[in-house]
Each structure stands twice: as structure tokens, then as C-alpha cells.
Amino acid sequence: MSRRQRRALAVTVLVIAAVALPFGVNAYWRATFVFILIAALGALGLDVLTGRTGQISLGHAFFLGAGAYAGGYLGGNLHLNAVVWIPAAGVAAGILGALVGPTALRLRGLYLAIVTIGLVFIGQHIFVNVTAISGGPGGRALPAPSFGPVNFATGYSIGGLTISHDELYYLLALLLLALGMLYVRNLERSHLGRAMAAVRERELAAAVLGVHVARTKVTAFVISSAMAGVAGAMYASYLGFVVPTQWDLLLSIEYVVMIVVGGMASLWGPLLGAVFVIGFPALLQDVSGSLPFLSNGLGGGVISVSDASAVIYGGLLIVFLLIEPRGVVGLVTRLRTLATRRRAAAP
């Protein structure tokens, strides 16, 4: 087989495995996989802004919440079809990103991060008080998507196959993530993608080379916010009910952890980071009954699952920042290079 044929075969196997994954696990892991894919989409948006353009943001939770409430209002109050309210949630969040983006023109680094932290608290205040859209402090229910006869709330049967609520959400989240990754892959090869990389490396040099720095930064904010809006709408719809306090600073920090651990400015980094941030605590919770030092909420144990996850998060962040700043993707690349060198040196 040629190299191209081997690559096509590998992609085909990967796609089949990804589609079939939720059908071979229990409900707990199906739900976990849905959360991982949705989080990966949101992290992919943050990576466009932070990893590829170098604009540090701790306000990602605001755009996730904006997308969630925009989707909830359009789908729940106006009863629009999911074909409309899911992308419209991204458009609404993208418009907010365009309004916030100009702040990055005068600020950078720590100062920009502080401003985006303020955005989270402003957003929570708005979400609590705009009760017509958010439902106020008590929260609001969000609709499940439906596409013709396919209703995500009840599942779907075709022939002898029944696709459950979780499996439908998984397949939709997988499709949205695949489209997002395809878009970012094409983006990094475009003129805009090269301009983002130039701004990330050095703004002054980018401007001298003819890059429109202001437009590049604002565009990065819009793309990042739009992806976050779609992810927020999917996340809230899957939960079925959300409250304003969910869109807090801790959520923003979790998304930063995803792109740092997974690997910034890499296509697979956000997904790998989401697997760690979402999947690892789920794994600890699943095995807590068989590990005596973990407390599963039923008594016993030395440390709770959430505390153990936080300790491991902190440790791995330190390890990656000191040893491999490119995250899991960089570690895999380093191991692959080492293996190639050893094979070349072997007699």
C-alpha cells in the first residue's frame, strides 16, 4: 500500500471507531464522551484565540453562557428548529466577541487576562438579571434538538436499531467537532491563519510585514467566541437545565487547562486536553469504589475525587510547563522523533 492509501485506511478506521464508540459502553461513559466532545469544541475555539493568536483570555465561560442562553431563547421561547438555533447561538456569541475584541487592541498579556476575568463577572450579573432570556438565578430549561423525525429528547429508531438520547447527542457533537477541526485546519493554512501566527510571535514585526494586527485580533475573538457559543448551546441543551452560576471563572480556567495540557496551536490538542480534564475525573469516579484512598461520597477514603483531580491537574500543569510546554501533542511528537532516530541508528 502507498502512503496515501495507508493514511486513508487509518482515517477510515478512526472515523468508524469514533462513530461506534458510544454504542459499546454504558450510559455513564456515553454521557462522559458527550461532555468531552462538547468541551473539545469549546477548547478548539479558545485555542484559536490563545494558542494561535497569542491573546490570553480567561473569559471563555462568558461566551459559553451567551451561546447557551441564545440557543435556549431561540429554541425554547421562539420554538425555532435546531438547524437554526444551534448555529445562531454561535452567531450571537460571535457578535459579543466582536464587541469585546477591540479591548485586545490596547491590552495584552496579564492585562488582557484581567479584563476578560471581569467579563465573566459582568456576564454572571447579566445572566442573573435578564430573566426573560436566562430565567434568572433559578435558571431555565433548554430544548433538546430535533431534526425532522429525529427528536433528541426521546431517541430515534430506524429499522431494528434504536439510537438513544445520549448517542444522538454524541453523534451531533462529533459532527460539530469534526467540522470545527476541519475549519481550523484550513484556517491555519490560510492568509488569516498565517497572520494570526505572526501576531502571536511578535506584533510589531507582523505589522511591519503588512499584517493588519487589529483586524486579526478581532477576527480571532469572533471565531473563538462563535465556537464557544455553539459548544455552550450544546452543553446546556444536553444538561437540559442551567443556572447563571455555572458560567464562572473556574469553567474558564478549565478550558485554559485543556489547551495547555493538550497542546496549544495544535489540531488535536483541545480534544486531548478535554479527554484529560473531563475524562480523568470521570475515570476516578468510576474506579473510586475499588481504590481505598478515594472517597466516592459514601464514606471512607482519604481524598475526594474532585480534590484528587485538582491535585493531579496542578501537578501535570507544572510538569508540562517545565518539561514539555507543547502538552500531550508535543510529548507524542518528541517520542515519535526519538523512535524514528533509534530506528535509523539501528544496524
Image: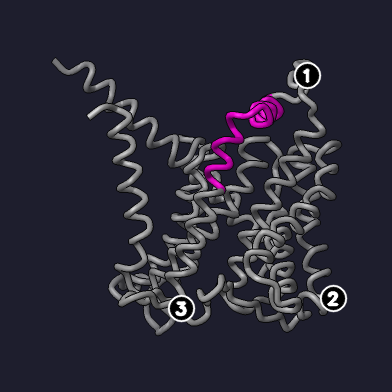
Can residue 314 be spotted in the picture? no
Q: Earlier in the sequence, mark 1 or mark 2?
A: 2
Q: Residues within 10 Å of mark 2 (few under 14, many from 20)?
A: some
Q: Percent position (x, y) of residue 327?
A: 47, 40
* Identity of the residue drawn at 59% across and 66% down: 234
The image's mark for residue 129 is 2
Quadrant of the image containing the N terminus: top left
Can residue 168 be spotted in the picture? yes
* Identity of the residue drawn at 40% across and 69% down: 30
Q: Amino acid at mark 1?
A: Gly
Residue bounds of the magenta highlight: 180-201
Q: Percent position (x, y) of residue 290?
A: 28, 73
* Identity of the residue drawn at 53% across and 42% down: 182
Q: Percent position (x, y) of residue 177?
A: 52, 53
Q: Amino acid at mark 2?
A: Asn
Classify mark 1: helix, strand or loop.
loop
Circle 3 residue:
155
Circle 3 or circle 1, nearest the eye:
3
